[in-house]
Amino acid sequence: MDEQVKKSRKKRNPREHANLFTVLTFLYTFPLFLLGNTRDINESDLYETYTGHKASILGKQSQILWQEELDNANTQKRKPSLLKVLVKILGWDFLLIGIAVGFENFIAQ
């Protein structure tokens, strides 16, 4: 099983070295779409998971932020908010996507 996993190493995710414009417009996905237009995409064509989206990193980050939220909630005598933790973890990603979509809608009209 491990040999099969090692043999099927995926290509490095292009978002790792993409600039801000490329990330906002998702242009780093363009080569994969071109490939899918010419032939069926198989597993060997896919990229590795983006480093910032790996479960180990997000899990550690969420655990740290949740503990901070619990501590803050106890000192302020309120209920801890899972929503606050999720916004701290994923807020920037959603903000950038929202800006990109807003810019795209503005240009389209």
Image: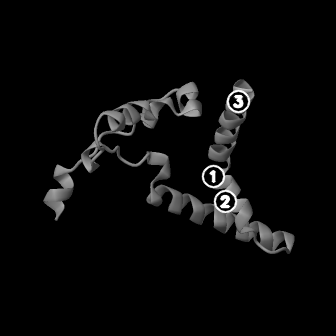
Q: Position of residue 46 (x, y in %)?
A: 33, 45
Question: What separation in Å lies between label 3 and label 2 (alpha carbons)?
Answer: 25 Å
Picture residue at 72% right of the left edge, 63% below the top: 83
* Relative to 32, residue 58 above or below: below
Please tell me whether mark 2 sits on a helix, a strand or a loop: helix
- Marks 2 and 1: CB-CB under 8 Å? yes
Q: Residues within 10 Å of mark 3 (few under 14, many from 20)?
A: few
Picture residue at 74% right of the left edge, 28% below the top: 106
Q: Is residue 26 left or right of residue 89?
A: left
Q: Is residue 104 left or right of residue 40?
A: right
Q: Quadrant of the N terminus?
A: bottom left
- Residue that numbered label 2 is attached to: 86
Quarter-wise, where is residue 36 in the image? top left
- Residue that numbered label 1 is attached to: 90
Front in this rendered view, residue 1 or 25: 25
- Residue that numbered label 3 is attached to: 103
Quarter-wise, where is residue 72 in the image? bottom right
Please tell me whether mark 3 sits on a helix, a strand or a loop: helix
Q: Is residue 27 left or right of residue 82?
A: left
Residue type at numbered disc 1: Leu
Q: Quadrant of the C terminus?
A: top right
Residue type at numbered disc 2: Leu
**Which is in the foreground here, disc 3 or disc 1?**
3
Front in this rendered view, residue 22 or 54: 22
Question: What separation in Å lies between label 2 and label 1 (alpha carbons)?
Answer: 6 Å
Q: Position of residue 58 (x, y in %)?
A: 52, 57
**Which is in the foreground here, disc 3 or disc 2?**
3
Residue type at numbered disc 3: Phe
Please tell me whether mark 1 sits on a helix, a strand or a loop: helix
Q: Residues within 10 Å of mark 2 (few under 14, many from 20)?
A: few
Picture residue at 79% right of the left edge, 70% below the top: 73
